[in-house]
Amino acid sequence: MLNSIFRKWLWASACITLVVLLLMTAAVSWLVQRNYYKQGMERLNEQSVYVEEAYQQHLSGELTAADFRKELKQLERENKVNISLVGKKVKFLKQDLYEVGVRPDVKSWIDTVSGGERIEHISKFRKEDNGTMLVVGFPLMKNDQVTAAAFIYSPSADVRALAEPIRRSIWLIALACAGPLILLLWLATRRFVRPIRQISEAAASIAGGDFSSRVHVTGQDELARLGDSFNAMAGRMERIEDQRRRLIMEISHELRTPLTSIRGTLQALRDGLLSGKEQEEFVELSLGESVRLGRLIDSIHELSAFEEHQIKFDWEQVDLTELTEQSAQQLRTKAESAGMRLHAQADERIVLRGDPMRLRQVLLNLIGNALEHNASGTEVCVRVERKERKAVITVSDNGQGIAAEHLPHLFERLYKAESSRTSRGSGLGLTIVRYIVQAHGGTIAVRSEQGKGTAFQVELPMTNF
């Protein structure tokens, strides 16, 4: 296909260039010939002056009719022209010769010149002529009266013969330039098509599964911008593919742990290796692992639904202050059993438009993480406040904190900062929380310092629509 594009582009460019070159050469050739025609007309006009002077000398008696005719013949021989005089008042020699030469076939020329005007034409003087003539017509005057119409004409072929060497040289130069021009076009077309070829080859590589392919296009034109956009797209696809592979590996790892535990319990039960009390304990353990496995599968399914935009939200007016208090109350017993203090704060009643079930999910996840990953004696605070036209939810604790290198990755799928902190979690909760917050038009951020605690801050617009 690219070769076809290259050939088509080169062929089109070469045709356009050759046509332009042909037109320019033809135009220059025509201008050269026209210039020679103009010079030929000027030469005929110069000779017309001699005819007028000789005619005035004839009228004044300085030249006889015979001498006048000799002057005309000499002028014709020396300049290779033909002279015609049309008029009844002109007499030559002793005969009643009213005209010299032949009349032009175009009667309007005679009428125009007899009216006192000059004419210039490139045309046949008579139908019998073999080719066109350069014709100059001018009146011969006596006492301000036109007494005759004079015409001087010569074959235009003579002028073309003078211009022909130059015209031939012009065409030869044009032909000599055509080769280098086509070569330059070939090089330019090759350079122009090269980025397209690179993009096509890179696209084929990506289609084949190699997401590391990139194009190297320099410049500031549209092709360079296309190359940059393609590289950005390829980079995003590569990251998505890496995330997909990592997700599969992480899901496999997460599923392997409970399945291994359940399988070990079942094998022990089958082999009769457990006593009655141990059987009860291992069955309880397997039941817990199966519940954890079910939650992990549900979380994966829910995350997939969020990523595919298949989750439907039930929008309504939500009392965020009341919802926060209810969520804290729901987990207060768990906090007390873990030896922690959990309390909620709100300076005013804040109402916004949202999905109450999903917002409750956000609160329970953030509060639950704080309770799950901190030691006894930790204080967890949930605060709701208004900042300008935003509702701000802050879930903070004074626990062990999170290392700085883990903070940028907390919202990634299945990311676990520390195995000791997240051994019982799926690693998908914060990712789902981020999707819910973004669906409400809000943002979520985290601040943490090891040994001092962690704070998650959610900002939601007071009006979402």
Image (cartoon, grey):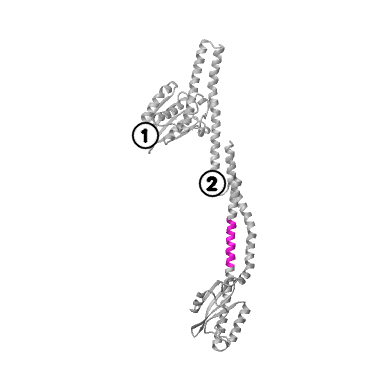
**Residue 425 in the image, given as x and y percentages of width and height:** 49, 25
Where are the magenta residues, as a range?
Answer: 16-32
Circle 2 is placed at which residue position? 225
Kind of residue at badge 2: Arg
Task: Tell me if residue 423 comes above or below residue 386 in the rendering.
Answer: above
Give the residue displayed 61% in from the left and 81% down from the top.
73
Question: Does residue 163 show up magenta in the picture?
Answer: no
Which mark is in front, 2 or 1?
A: 2
Q: Residues within 10 Å of mark 2 (few under 14, many from 20)?
A: some
Q: Is residue 233 left or right of residue 455?
A: right
User: Which SS class for mark 2?
Assistant: helix
Q: Which mark is residue 445?
A: none
Quadrant of the image containing the N terminus: top right
Quadrant housing residue 438: top left
Q: Residues within 10 Å of mark 1 (few under 14, many from 20)?
A: some
Residue projecting furthest to the bottom = 61
**Residue 333 in the image, given as x and y percentages of width and height:** 41, 22
Circle 1 is placed at which residue position? 352
User: Which SS class for mark 1?
Assistant: strand
